[in-house]
Image (cartoon, rainbow, N blue to C red):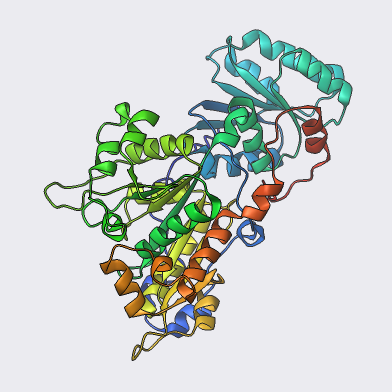
């Protein structure tokens, strides 16, 4: 028996910075960016809408593979961001290897076993496996036989899920979610992370205005979390007193629950609340990734939408936060530094989130007088992302809004900037797709869907 030791890990590249590709850090001309490939995977190119809402708990999983195709699917599954809280170890040898292993070792929370056997032989293997499994262990069986009678026998034996091999990595993740938390998936809120390619791109302004727009359009609760603790501007933009909202939420992770979370929020309207940054330099703010993870968990269980205003920084907690977000919005300005950083950031996110749609790109401050700019078409060619919005440079409008603690639409509701924030909100939430979707529970229908499915990228539909 060979231990392939695939272990899911949080953060981009398992907590390590993504390797620069194509010599990007040595490039200094626009042409060098236009001629190099960003290295997007086919899964990213095919992904379009938001992913199905799934939650995987903090569990240990052993997978026993009987074919190379299934082993590859397990490896992709382990690398996905949704598996960041799990400990997944894969072995070769199928059910026979699992039986030998558990004669000497305790069983984890979930055992996934693949077998090429069929009918009574498959059932006999599972019966022998049951004899060495600890009480409470769940089993997902992966077979090569599409047989309703076999499926019924598996249910009688207490098997939690049956899938047909070869199984798609996202189908495996969805099955684990159904086993443990599928019933609660509809109550999970969405997390959207906003980050700029460099300081001064206007990412925070866009995040604040999109949060405000989202709350007004959907008439649904939205929380804006300002994660730039020393320099955050959300309280200024909404003209509210700064508080210790975020700082208090992450100070003692063990205390944070829905009640404390709600108490730390500052109301900014009927449906919008702010988790503000202290905006002071009396303390250093070395954020802990576990604290941010807990904050996101509580936010998801409390409100439908959470907007994260991330500072322009590349730390372990910012990497893991970006990897965990449901959607990412990158704000760039049409200059060389933003182009380089946008390309590096998109490449890193595509590597960390291979089964997710690519991040959304917003071009801001377009048409600034007397500033040489990279043409939008050249920017798109280099980054290989079409911007969801291009926001023109309007210094008087944005300055008036900032100085008066108002949103752009409150100053000029008919302008192109206000319309752009609505476009970003719609693209980010995928509202039309959400109205069609519904949560899928494990039932007889799901068995037939799994049986008919072919290996390939997940559709990404809700």
Percent from the top left, x then y, of residue 25?
37, 71
Q: Residue at x 81, y 27 (%)?
A: 444
Query: Quadrant where the N terminus lies?
Result: top right
In the foreground, 375 or 82: 375
In the foreground, 98 or 38: 38
Question: Is 385 situated left or right of 401 in this image?
Answer: right
Percent from the top left, x then y, of residue 383?
51, 72
Percent from the top left, x then y, of residue 364?
42, 74
Q: Residue at x 30, y 27 (%)?
A: 255
Q: Can I make out residue 2 in this image? A: no
Q: Quadrant of residue 121?
A: top right
Whether residue 131 is situated above or below residue 199 in the rendered picture: above
Q: Residue at x 32, y 61 (%)?
A: 312
Q: Quadrant of residue 407?
A: bottom left
Question: Is 49 situated left or right of 82 in this image?
Answer: right
Q: Residue furthest bottom?
A: 370
Percent from the top left, x then y, of residue 56?
54, 33
Q: Residue at x 55, y 17 (%)?
A: 107
In the foreground, 221 or 106: 221
In the foreground, 59 or 281: 281
Q: Can I make out residue 254 in this image? A: yes
Counting the numbered discs, the total is 0
Whether residue 136 is situated above or below residue 160 in the rendered picture: above
């Amino acid at each position: 028996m060979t231990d392939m030791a695939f272990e899911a890990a949080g953060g981009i590249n398992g907590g390590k910075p993504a390797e620069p590709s194509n010599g990007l850090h040595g490039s200094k001309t626009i042409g060098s960016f236009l001629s190099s490939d960003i290295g997007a995977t086919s899964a990213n190119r095919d992904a379009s809408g938001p992913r199905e809402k799934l939650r995987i708990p903090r569990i240990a999983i052993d997978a026993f593979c009987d074919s190379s195709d299934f082993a590859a699917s397990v490896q992709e599954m382990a690398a996905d961001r949704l598996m960041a809280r799990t400990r997944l170890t894969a072995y070769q040898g199928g059910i026979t290897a699992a039986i030998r292993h558990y004669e000497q070792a305790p069983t984890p929370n979930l055992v996934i076993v693949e077998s090429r056997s069929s009918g009574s032989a498959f059932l006999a293997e599972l019966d022998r496996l049951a004899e060495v499994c600890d009480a409470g262990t769940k089993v997902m069986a992966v077979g090569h036989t599409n047989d309703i009678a076999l499926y019924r026998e598996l249910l009688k034996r207490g098997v939690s899920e049956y899938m047909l091999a070869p199984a798609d990595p996202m189908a495996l993740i969805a099955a684990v979610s159904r086993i443990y938390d599928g019933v609660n998936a509809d109550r999970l809120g969405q997390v959207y992370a906003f980050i700029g390619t460099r300081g001064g791109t206007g990412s925070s302004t866009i995040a604040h205005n999109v949060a405000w727009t989202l709350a007004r359009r959907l008439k649904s609760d939205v929380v804006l979390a300002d994660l730039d603790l020393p320099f955050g501007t959300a309280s200024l933009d909404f003209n509210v007193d700064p508080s210790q909202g975020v700082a208090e939420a992450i100070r003692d992770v063990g205390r944070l629950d829905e009640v404390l979370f709600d108490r730390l929020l500052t109301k900014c309207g009927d449906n919008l609340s702010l988790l503000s940054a202290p905006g002071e330099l009396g303390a250093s703010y070395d954020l802990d990734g576990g604290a941010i993870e807990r904050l996101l968990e509580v936010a998801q269980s409390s409100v439908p939408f959470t907007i994260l205003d991330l500072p322009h920084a590349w730390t372990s907690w910012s990497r893991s936060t970006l990897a965990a977000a449901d959607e990412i919005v990158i704000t760039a300005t049409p200059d060389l530094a933003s182009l380089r950083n946008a390309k590096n950031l998109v490449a890193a996110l595509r590597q960390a989130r291979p089964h997710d749609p690519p991040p959304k790109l917003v071009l801001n401050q377009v048409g600034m007088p007397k500033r040489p700019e990279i043409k939008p078409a050249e920017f798109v060619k280099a980054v290989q992302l079409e911007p969801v919005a291009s926001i023109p440079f309007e210094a008087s409008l944005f300055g008036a809004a900032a100085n008066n603690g108002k949103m752009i639409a409150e100053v000029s509701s008919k302008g192109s900037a206000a319309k752009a924030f609505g476009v970003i909100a719609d693209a980010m939430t995928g509202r039309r797709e959400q109205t069609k979707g519904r949560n899928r529970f494990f039932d007889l229908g799901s068995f037939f869907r799994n049986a008919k499915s072919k290996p390939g990228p997940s559709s990404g539909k809700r």
